[in-house]
Amino acid sequence: MTVFDEVAAEGHEQVLFGYDKVSGLKAIIAIHSTALGPALGGTRFFPYESEHDALVDVLRLSQGMSYKAAAAGLDLGGGKAVIIGDPREDKSERLLRAYGRIVDSLQGRYITAEDVGTTTHDLDIVRRETRWALGNSVAEGGAGDPSPITARGLFAAARAIAEFVFGNSELEGRTFAVQGVGKVGSAFVQLLIEARANVVIADAYQPTLEAAVAKFGVDTVPIDEVHTLECDFFSPCALGAVLNEETIPQLNCKAIVGSANNQLATDKDAERLHERGIVYGPDFVVNAGGLINVYDELHGYSKVRALHRVDGIYDATMRILETARDQDINPHMAAIHVAQERIRDIGDLRRFRRSGDDRN
Ligand code: NAD
């Protein structure tokens, strides 16, 4: 496959390769779609084994961002960037500012934010070269750490799933097995405890696990058992690809709601869950709180407005579960259809020129 074949496969609009010899910057920015608005997605700084791996990743991630924004009903397209390198060794002010200049060259067609391997501090440096970088700290008038808001969105999704599965959105007395109690997982556990749900947790990092036990007084299970627990909800809040050919037959839950990105190893795994009668809250729908929060910065951040929009994840999740039921497809496919439909229908509005000067 040539580079253009790969770009064409999922209909990406543009891929930009940015290079700075002095700092060693090698960045790829992928814009999947700007049909609904500017393409927003974080910058991943990662030591990819090859440039091809980096390209495949950025194409996949940017497409996921289009779906996430569209399913959340935002006026945003999907994009993502990767910087090839080890964030602990290769990061420098020069590299980040060179990257900022490349982002700036797109004049807002792509807007960046944090992702794996980049921090708020890095984004502050990128922002010295471009205004098209979000995820400002609270001190700078931004939205700050999105994790508690992501957890709030998960909680709204869990209530919608409970309503759909059990006919009652109350989470009191429901059992949750939470895999990973980092930034999002622990904030989610806090909300569950406040709602009087029963929670069992697992985490690969002992100090994080102990801190959560001390704070919430919940029980723990080994990390290789958490997905097998008998419970109402399994909640993957750690890694991707945890729902796969091997783990799905071992699940003993009725539904899944978690923050991890790309929880399904393959699209077939959504069908495997469906066949087992386990209701899956599509990851890019239920974990959109962070994106919704950062999107709000574009309009001068208002926490009240952002929280209100994040609570809309209840309706977004319900709509997708109902679409899946009505069309007899799995919720993952239903979510993709809902997102694609919005990209097509609302994106198409641009054909209507508002004036002779309208260049959108
Ligand atoms: P984090 O690094 O703070 O937490 C992840 C936790 O998972 C850590 O405590 C880690 O020790 C634990 N972990 C790692 N491997 C594990 C395993 N095999 N079993 C059990 N625990 C394991 O990250 P986070 O910000 O809480 O994000 C969690 C997930 O949610 C990630 O996939 C992230 O991409 C996704 N996500 C986060 C946000 C956000 O707002 N932070 C938004 C959308 C999606």
Image (cartoon, rainbow, N blue to C red):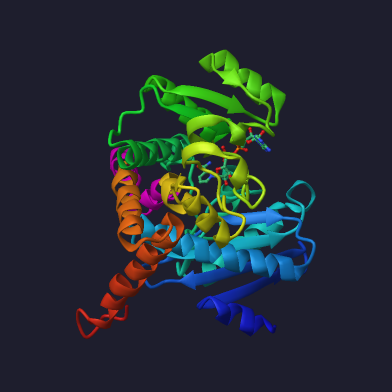
Q: In the image, is residue 217 above or below residue 96?
A: above
- Nearest the eye: 154 or 352: 154
**Residue at the spot x=22%, y=86% of the render?**
356
Majority secondary structure in the magenta region: helix
| Residue 87 left/right relative to 271 | right
Residue 320: x and y in percent read 34, 55
Residue 34: x and y in percent read 42, 71
Quadrant of the image where one finds ligand 1 = top right
Q: In the image, is residue 22 above or below residue 308?
A: below
**Residue at the spot x=70%, y=31% of the render?**
204
- Nearest the eye: 99 or 148: 148
Q: In the image, is residue 302 above or below residue 210?
A: below
Residue 357: x and y in percent read 25, 83
Q: Is residue 144 visible?
A: no
| Number of disc labels | 0
On-image quarter of the N terminus? bottom right
Q: In the image, is residue 116 above or below residue 101?
A: above
Q: Is residue 354 visible?
A: yes
- Nearest the eye: 197 or 278: 278
- Nearest the eye: 180 or 231: 231
| Residue 320 left/right relative to 51 | left
Residue 302 magenta: yes
On-image quarter of the C terminus? bottom left
Residue 272: x and y in percent read 54, 54
Q: Which residues are magenta?
A: 291-310
**Residue at the spot x=41%, y=26% of the render?**
174
| Residue 155 left/right relative to 115 | left
